[in-house]
């Protein structure tokens, strides 16, 4: 990827992304735990895991803001965390595509979110893994992860809007 952002910009983007994931899933978790949303009740653990991942991303970004000497290391770790979020979201999409989820489960699919997250991960990875020894990692993020995520994103949207 040719888009280059400063390490500080990436840290702040990760801070915002982490807060977004934590708040969005934290609200859903609150609804599940309070009993106000029964259709999500079987997904409490999954929602909690997303909330924790968002908090980890935000907390590590906050740490990177305070410790500029650790930014490169933290960005590399955050890339792995964003890849984990992408994998989890892709698995969820594949479950929707294959009918592995209950038809009574409420589904919300933000079309484009998986694609944008994968594109951002490729940009983040191109910075975090800039050293020549990581060329395979950069290629996998750009030429394998992104196309798969775009295809899964589109297919999932088509499936749930049928």
Image (tube, helix red, strand yellow):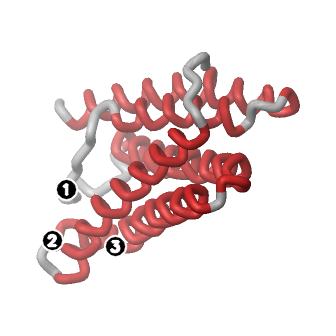
Residue at disc 2, secondary structure:
loop
User: 31 or 7, which is in the foreground?
Assistant: 7
Residue 20 seen: yes
Q: Residue furthest left?
A: 36
The residues tagged by marks 1 and 3 sit, at their Cα atoms, a distance apart of: 13 Å
| Screen quadrant of the C terminus | top left
Residue at the spot of label 3: 44
Query: What x and y, as percent, mark residue 28?
Result: 24, 66
Which residue shows up at 26% across the image and 39% down it? Answer: 110
Task: Kindly report which numbered mark, 1 or 3, lies closer to the viewer in this rendering.
Answer: 3
> Are the residues at dot 1 and dot 3 in contact (C-beta closer than 8 Å)?
no
| Screen quadrant of the N terminus | top right
The residues tagged by marks 2 and 3 sit, at their Cα atoms, a distance apart of: 11 Å
In the image: residue 157, left or right of residue 59: left
User: 31 or 128, which is in the foreground?
Assistant: 128
The residues tagged by marks 1 and 2 sit, at their Cα atoms, a distance apart of: 10 Å
Which residue shows up at 45% across the image and 37% down it? Answer: 117
Which circle's residue, 2 or 3, is located before the other in the chain? 2
Residue 91 seen: no
> Are the residues at dot 1 and dot 2 in contact (C-beta closer than 8 Å)?
yes
Answer with the quarter of the image where residue 41 lies: bottom left
Count neighbours of disc 3 (C-alpha within 10 A) and say few if under 14, some if 14 to 19, many if 20 or more: some
Count neighbours of disc 1 (C-alpha within 10 A) and say few if under 14, some if 14 to 19, many if 20 or more: few
Which circle's residue, 1 or 2, is located before the other in the chain? 2
Count neighbours of disc 2 (C-alpha within 10 A) and say few if under 14, some if 14 to 19, many if 20 or more: some
Residue at disc 1, secondary structure:
loop
Which circle's residue, 1 or 3, is located before the other in the chain? 3
Residue at the spot of label 2: 37
Which residue shows up at 45% across the image and 53% down it? Answer: 15
What numbered label is drawn on residue 106?
1
In the image: residue 70, left or right of residue 119: right
Query: What x and y, as percent, mark residue 26?
Result: 30, 68
């Amino acid at each position: 990827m040719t888009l280059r952002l400063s390490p500080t910009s990436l840290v702040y983007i990760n801070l915002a992304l982490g807060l977004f994931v934590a708040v969005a899933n934290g609200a859903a978790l609150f609804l599940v735990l309070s009993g106000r949303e029964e259709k999500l009740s079987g997904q409490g653990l999954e929602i909690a895991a997303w909330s924790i991942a968002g908090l980890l991303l935000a907390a590590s970004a906050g740490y990177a803001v305070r410790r500029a000497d650790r930014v490169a290391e933290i960005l590399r770790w955050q890339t792995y965390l964003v890849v984990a979020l992408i994998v989890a979201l892709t698995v969820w999409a594949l479950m929707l595509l294959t009918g592995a989820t209950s038809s009574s489960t409420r589904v919300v699919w933000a079309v484009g979110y998986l694609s944008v997250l994968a594109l951002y991960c490729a940009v983040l990875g191109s910075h975090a893994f800039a050293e020549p020894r990581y060329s395979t990692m950069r290629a996998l993020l750009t030429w394998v992860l992104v196309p798969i995520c775009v295809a899964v994103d589109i297919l999932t949207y088509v499936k749930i809007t049928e």
